[in-house]
Image (tube, grey):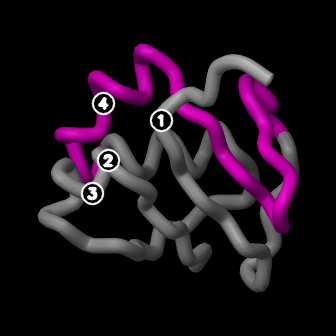
């Protein structure tokens, strides 16, 4: 199981939970599992989200490997620089 910190406005789709656990080995599996377990996240995930893995922010990195001990944060899509 991978622990996922839910950031900001996305918590409303997880019943206010700041952290959830899902079974996943990569970002695609993680997002698919989050939609199954927390259907309220689906609209935001379809619009786009950013994932931070061990302090590095990713976007559209579907098959990036996630280890069970990785620090994972799900955030609304980050724009700008």
What stretch of residues is rendered in magenta? 36-63
| Contact between labelled residues 4 and 2, with CB atoms less than 8 Å apart | no
| Contact between labelled residues 1 and 2, with CB atoms less than 8 Å apart | yes
| Contact between labelled residues 3 and 2, with CB atoms less than 8 Å apart | yes
Q: Residue at x 55, y 77 (%)?
A: 3
Q: Which residue is drawn at 66% across and 45% down?
A: 51
Q: Earlier in the sequence, mark 3 or mark 1?
A: 3
In this figure, which residue is indicated by the disc labeled 2? 10
Q: Earlier in the sequence, mark 4 or mark 3?
A: 3
In this figure, which residue is indicated by the disc labeled 1? 76
What is the spatial separation of the Cα atoms under label 2 and label 4, in whole angstroms? Answer: 10 Å
**To which quarter of the image does residue 71 belong?**
bottom right
**In the image, residue 38 lies at what x, y percent?**
24, 51
In this figure, which residue is indicated by the disc labeled 3? 11
Q: Residue 42 carries which label?
A: 4
Q: Nearer the viewer, mark 4 or mark 3?
A: 3
Q: Is residue 21 left or right of residue 38?
A: right
Furthest residue in direction front, as rendered? 81
């Amino acid at each position: 199981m991978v622990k996922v910190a839910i950031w900001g406005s996305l918590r409303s789709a997880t019943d206010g939970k700041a952290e959830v656990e899902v079974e996943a080995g990569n970002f695609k599996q993680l997002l698919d599992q989050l939609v199954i377990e927390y259907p309220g996240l689906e609209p935001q995930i379809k619009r786009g989200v950013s994932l931070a893995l061990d302090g590095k922010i990713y976007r559209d990195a579907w098959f990036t490997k996630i280890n069970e001990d990785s620090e994972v944060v799900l955030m609304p899509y980050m724009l700008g620089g």
